[in-house]
């Protein structure tokens, strides 16, 4: 088995495969980040938000995935909240956020995609940070499998995709699953948080109905799904608006482990943990 570890997309990555290509993974992820980051000046996404149109096949592909997830979750996952996140203070990489004064913005963003061209209509900004990492994990996993890997695990800061063997993965508190062939992702309102000058606590998962950080009884969601991108989007949606998403999981062949505000953990039908 070959392994590599590096930092990208604001988080730590760890990759393992019994095939070739592991040494190239950091370069693959760096290239993806240069296209999809909201915080790297000159990225394709930054140019799209500034110029309102860009021709980039990767941006188009990930935007299609993000918009499909918005429809799947009845808007609980929404990539069109970039301007809202920036107004709340998340306008730079998380490591650089200190105390931020939130602002109010009106966002009425529409996204049009024609082949590799993405165009924005109306006000607002596109934010692919909520799905780009999961998509990147899937992309790396699939490239390693195509290169000949039979046992592959890609961990991008908790967004994971594994195949070929039951990989033991720690989730929640003192819990574990066996990830045999699929993805797992965790979203939490307890992390990636910052404060306003008045001391109010803000975090990065926004309720699309209010434009404010989500406040409900779901604090953390861990989702097992066929892909890391789907797991990431559904985990975010469960924290943002659980009322719109919980009833849809079983029909999607997806299961979840959830922590509520009282610190209690509970799981949906189909959730299986390692013995």
Image (cartoon, rainbow, N blue to C red):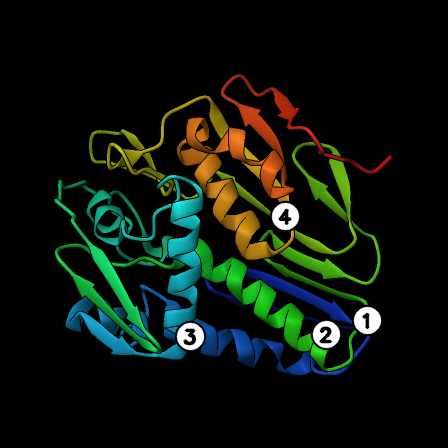
Question: Please, is residue 123 above or below residue 254 in the view?
Answer: below
Identify residue for label 4. Answer: 225
Residue 14 percent location from the top left of the image: 66, 64
- Could you tell me which residue is drawn at 20 percent across and 35 percent down? 197
Q: How many neighbours does mark 4 have within 10 angstroms: few (below 14), some (14-19), or many (20 or more)? A: many
- The answer to whether marks 1 and 2 mark residues whose Cβ atoms lie closer than 8 Å is yes
* First in residue order: circle 2 vs circle 4: 2
Q: How many neighbours does mark 1 have within 10 angstroms: few (below 14), some (14-19), or many (20 or more)? A: some
Horizontal placement of 1 versus 101: left or right?
right
- In front: 12, or 251? 251
Classify mark 1: helix, strand or loop. Answer: loop
Identify residue for label 1. Answer: 150
Q: Quadrant of residue 204?
A: top left
Identify residue for label 3. Answer: 58
* First in residue order: circle 2 vs circle 3: 3
> Where's the N terminus, which quadrant?
bottom right
Residue 88 percent location from the top left of the image: 23, 43
């Amino acid at each position: 088995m070959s392994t590599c570890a590096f930092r990208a997309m604001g988080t730590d990555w760890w990759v393992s495969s019994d095939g070739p290509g592991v040494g190239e993974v950091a370069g693959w992820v760096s290239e993806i980040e240069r296209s999809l980051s909201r915080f790297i000046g000159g990225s394709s996404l930054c140019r799209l938000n500034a110029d309102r149109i860009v021709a980039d096949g990767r941006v188009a592909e990930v935007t299609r995935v993000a918009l499909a997830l918005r429809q799947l979750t009845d808007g609980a996952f929404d990539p069109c909240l970039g301007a809202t996140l920036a107004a709340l203070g998340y306008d730079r990489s998380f490591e650089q956020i200190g105390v931020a004064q939130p602002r109010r913005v009106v966002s009425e963003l529409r996204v049009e995609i024609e082949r590799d061209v993405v165009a924005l209509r109306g006000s607002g900004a596109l934010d692919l940070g909520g799905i780009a990492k999961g998509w990147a994990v899937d992309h790396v996993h699939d490239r390693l499998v195509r290169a000949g890997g039979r046992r592959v695990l890609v961990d991008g800061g908790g967004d994971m995709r594994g195949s070929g063997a039951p990989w033991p993965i720690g989730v929640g508190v003192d819990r574990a699953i066996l990830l045999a062939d699929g993805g797992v992702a965790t979203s939490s309102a307890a992390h990636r948080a910052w404060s306003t000058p008045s001391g109010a606590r803000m975090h990065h998962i926004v309720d699309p109905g209010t434009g404010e950080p989500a406040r409900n009884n779901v604090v953390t969601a861990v989702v097992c799904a066929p892909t890391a991108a789907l797991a990431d989007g559904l985990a975010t949606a469960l924290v943002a608006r659980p009322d719109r998403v919980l009833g849809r999981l079983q029909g999607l062949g997806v299961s979840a482990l959830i922590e509520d505000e009282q610190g209690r953990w509970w799981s949906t039908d189909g959730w299986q943990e390692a013995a």
